[in-house]
Amino acid sequence: MIAPTLSPASTGGPILRCSNVRKSFGANEVLRGISFEIPAGSVLTIIGASGSGKSTLLRCLNHLEQPTSGEVYLDGEPMGVRIKPNGTRVPDKAANIARKRAQIGMVFQQFNLWPHMTALQNVTEALIQVKGLDRAKAADLGRNTLAKVNLLEKADDYPARLSGGQQQRVAIARALAMAPKVMLFDEATSSLDPELTGEVLEVMRQLAQEGMTMVVVTHEMGFAREVSDRVIFLHEGQIDQDGTPEEVFVKPTSERCRRFLSSALS
Amino acid sequence: MIDNFNRFVIPNLDLLAHGLWVTVRICAVAFAMAVAMGAAACVIRLYVPGVRYLAIGYIEFSRATPIIVQLLWVNYVWPELFGFPQSVEWAGIIALAIQSSGYLAETFRSGIEGLPRGQIEASMAVGMSRSRTFRRIVAPQVLLVMAPSIVNQLAVVVKASTLVSVIAIPDLMYDALKIVNQWFEPIEVLTSVAVIYILTIFSLSAIAKRIADYFREKYGLAAYA
Ligand SMILES: Nc1ncnc2c1ncn2[C@@H]1O[C@H](COP(=O)(O)OP(=O)(O)OP(=O)(O)O)[C@@H](O)[C@H]1O
Ligand SMILES: [Mg+2]
């Protein structure tokens, strides 16, 4: 049995579209007009120096942060705002935002598993609480998804008993089980010991091959080059370089991007 | 000594046992109320902007007032003001509950605020609402992480309960003093009572420590207790 990784048919347009997104924290403008589209089944990688706004951008995509202005569209529908019949835009209800968030998987640098739940319970929690599956169905789906990340035998272990790499794979399974339209990875391997990054990257690579739409923030340049359809180099909240992995990694036109890459690769 | 023990303690075992039962009853009810009131005060303080200052005022008041003042105040002033409590036992229970609820509210709050923010974000990210996140992710962990502190607070209630004898509640301490005043032989009776309290408090602390160790081992949780 294969866990569903691809979600219900989408409208055919881009899965995610970001339109002139800006985000300020007080006087500090962290995102300064970001626009891009992510076609279904493609992998977008975001690279950039620390503090350039990568995490903030990902968090705006699922509205963990509310953009100060600009819009994010999930499968054609605006996130976080409702357009009234007369055309005016009003903030959407929390329940609607949550419903859309459930269609966006997110994987964090710190895993953020819930320590009071077993690996399986971490995966089934939202299936039961958000999707309303009954326990047996959720457990079935949960086990299938854990099997996909090669952790079936750890289903009943608590996170405290798992290695970092295993915890991160459970976190991926937790997001994946929801059959999201797109998955966001925020430096999923950055807090892992070097010998554990491989197993997590392997799972991500497999997802990409299966056609999962992904937005990946990473410092693993080799991996980015290998799996990405498109790479964006972020500098101080703006897209400084944007193109295929070939264009960005091999012949970047931006001097800043070139410098960033040479320091990141050394 | 053995002789006095046989004369003053053994014949009064019934009385002491009854006193112990009153102490247990008062502590149990007061503690249960304190947990409920503390949780309510904490939730209001953190999540209900309009009346959060009422909760803060209550918490500060309950922690800043000496237990003996609260006991006398609830016992003598409340019936005049509010028409209850109607018995000294309830007055004692309410006073103990008020005092502990303030401490428990702060215990719960530090548990909630100590929870790594990322866990809440992970919950929001899978589409859980704020209230569901609180019920499923935050509250259970706070109870687990804070369980040892909560049990220790029960030990504090037991200690504080020795003061309810001043409003004539016949608890263990009260009965012990009654026997002492009858024979003016304090050594054996008071020592026996001290031993009972010491054993109770020690076992509660031991339980708290076992719980902490178990949860740390199982969930890696007490790390941010
Ligand atoms: N909640 C917040 N409140 C205030 N400032 C914030 C907040 N979140 C992020 N920032 C600021 O926004 C800027 C961008 O942060 P962000 O985390 O998006 O960077 P990043 O590119 O992900 O960096 P890193 O590679 O270190 O993870 C930083 O200057 C940071 O201090
Ligand atoms: Mg970041």
Image (cartoon, helix red, strand yellow):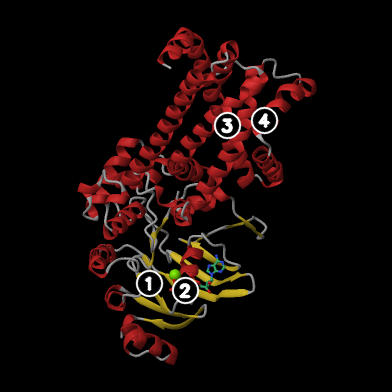
Q: Quadrant of residue A85?
A: bottom right
Chain on which label 1 sits: A
Q: Secondary structure at mark 1?
A: strand
Please give the chain letter of the residue carrying mark 3. B
Mark 3 falls on what kind of element? helix
Q: Is residue B137 left or right of residue A118?
A: right
Mark 3 — residue? Answer: B34
In space, the residues marked 1 and 4 are separated at their CA atoms by 66 Å
Q: Residues within 10 Å of mark 1 (few under 14, many from 20)?
A: many
Q: Could you say which is closer to the camera, residue B61 or residue A96? A: B61
Which mark is in front, 2 or 1? 1
Pointer 4: what residue? Answer: B68
| Residues tagged by mark 3 and mark 2 found on one chain of the structure | no
**Numbered tag placed on residue B12 in the rendering:** none
Expressed as whole percent of the image width and height from the top left, the position of residue A1 reads 20, 47
Residue displayed at 31% across by 38% down: A137
| Image marks 3 and 2: residues in contact by CB distance under 8 Å | no
Asked whether disc 1 touches disc 4, contact meaning CB atoms under 8 Å apart, the reply is: no
Q: Which residue is mark 1?
A: A44
Q: Amino acid at mark 4?
A: Ile
Q: Residue at x 43, y 44 (%)?
A: B145
Q: Amino acid at mark 3?
A: Ala
**Type of amino acid at the residue the image marks with label 1:** Leu
Q: Which mark is residue A36?
A: 2
